[in-house]
Each structure stands twice: as structure tokens, then as C-alpha cells.
Amino acid sequence: LPEYRCLNNNEIQRLKQSGTVITSPDTKELELVYTGDTSIEMFQLPQNAFILSSPILITEMTYIDGDRSKANFYGHIHIEDIIENAHLFENVKEIIFVHFSQRYSLSQIIQRLQEKLPIDLQCKVQCSLFSFGAKEYLTALADPSLAPSVTSNIAGWGWGLQGTGSTVTTTSVNNENSSSSVVNETTS
């Protein structure tokens, strides 16, 4: 309970021993799950079902083409893994894919996801095409008028901003001052 949060271990122990209820009823509600590098099998395990009850899921999708064996070998997710297991994500309200291989351009990523992902999944997907910088950009797939929605032609974890000639509509979250805004840009 909030009134006991600042107590030290000894004070909490005394309260427990005296029979005082110090915790609220079990009301675990996930707000966000971030998986990091993983494989699709992690979502299939019964003990991990709680992950798919989160309203927001951030997970990687390193590979969007080619043979899955490399993804499996290195413990990453391939787009085909997501497609074949789309039913697992039906209760997740928003999925943010991160950690795309730098071999793909941003326009390739957007195009491939829009072509391959089931439409009911696209409606809840955003992609973090740049990560671990001062700003994070989320690009939505659901609105086809935004395709290709890119700010660079290189994907991955914070690689440079090179123009693509595309119109850009992204959501920017500035980590430096915890503000968020919508950014509309045109590059040439």
C-alpha cells in the first residue's frame, strides 16, 4: 500500500508480523512489455502468456526477408514468424517493432511490412526505425497514405539521417526533455 512504501525492511517486517496488511490485492495490470532480442518461441510458451496481455508490446523484428535460419540461429525474429503467429497478438493493442537489420532501407521495411503483415496486425503496428538516440521516432503502418513513411534510408539503431525524397510523418518522443510531438518533414 502507498502509505508503507517509504518504510525500511525492519519496519515492514514488524508490520507483517503484527498482522497488518501492507500490500493491496493482487491487481497486476501490465502497461508495457519490452522483450529485447528474442525468438518467436518466447511468445508461444504458456508461462509467457502474460506478455500477450499487455496493451503495448515492444519487440524486435530483425529480419524482413530471406531465410529464417539466420534469425533462429542468432535468437531474432523474422517477419514470417510474426505472420504465422499473428493470432498470438490479437489481445495486444499496440505493437512496436524495433531492431531491424541495418541491411534494410527504411522504405524497404515499411513496404515489406505493409505487403506482408495481415491488415488486422498492421492496424496496431508502429516501427521504431531509429533507436537509442536523443529522439525516438515511431512510424505507423495503418495509414497507407503514409507509405513509405521514412526519415532516412538506413534502418537500425540510430544510424544517420540520409534523405530519401519521401514525405515523412512520424511521432517523435524527445528523451532529453520528456516531451512528445508530431513531426512532419519532407526530404529531398
Image: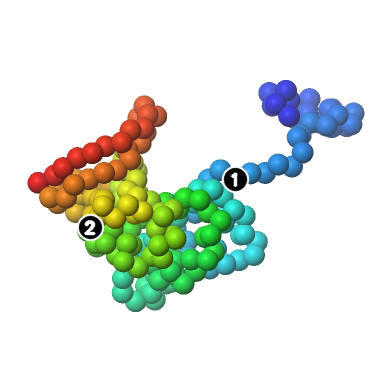
Seen at 31% across and 74% down, the residue is 66
Sequence-wise, which precedes: disc 2 or disc 1? Answer: 1
Q: Residues within 10 Å of mark 1 (few under 14, many from 20)?
A: some
Seen at 47% across and 61% down, the residue is 38
- The image shows residue 65, relative to residue 94, as above or below, that is below
- Amino acid type at circle 1 is Leu
Visual colour scheme: rainbow
Quarter of the rendering occupied by the N terminus: top right
Residue 43 appears at what percent x and percent y?
A: 55, 63
- Amino acid type at circle 2 is Ser
Seen at 62% across and 59% down, the residue is 49
- The kind of secondary structure element at disc 1 is loop
Residue 77 appears at what percent x and percent y?
A: 42, 65
Q: Which mark is residue 30?
A: 1
**Residue 157 appears in the picture as rendered:** no
Q: Residues within 10 Å of mark 2 (few under 14, many from 20)?
A: many
Nearest the viewer among 155 and 112 is 112
Residue 27 appears at what percent x and percent y?
A: 70, 41
Residue 65 appears at what percent x and percent y?
A: 31, 70
- The kind of secondary structure element at disc 2 is helix
Give the quadrant of residue 111: bottom left
Q: Is residue 68 left or right of residue 6?
A: left
Q: Is residue 1 left or right of residue 14?
A: left
Q: Is residue 142 left or right of residue 89?
A: left
Q: Which mark is residue 107?
A: 2
Seen at 44% across and 66% down, the residue is 82
Q: Which mark is residue 188?
A: none
Distance (Cα) linking label 2 and label 1: 32 Å
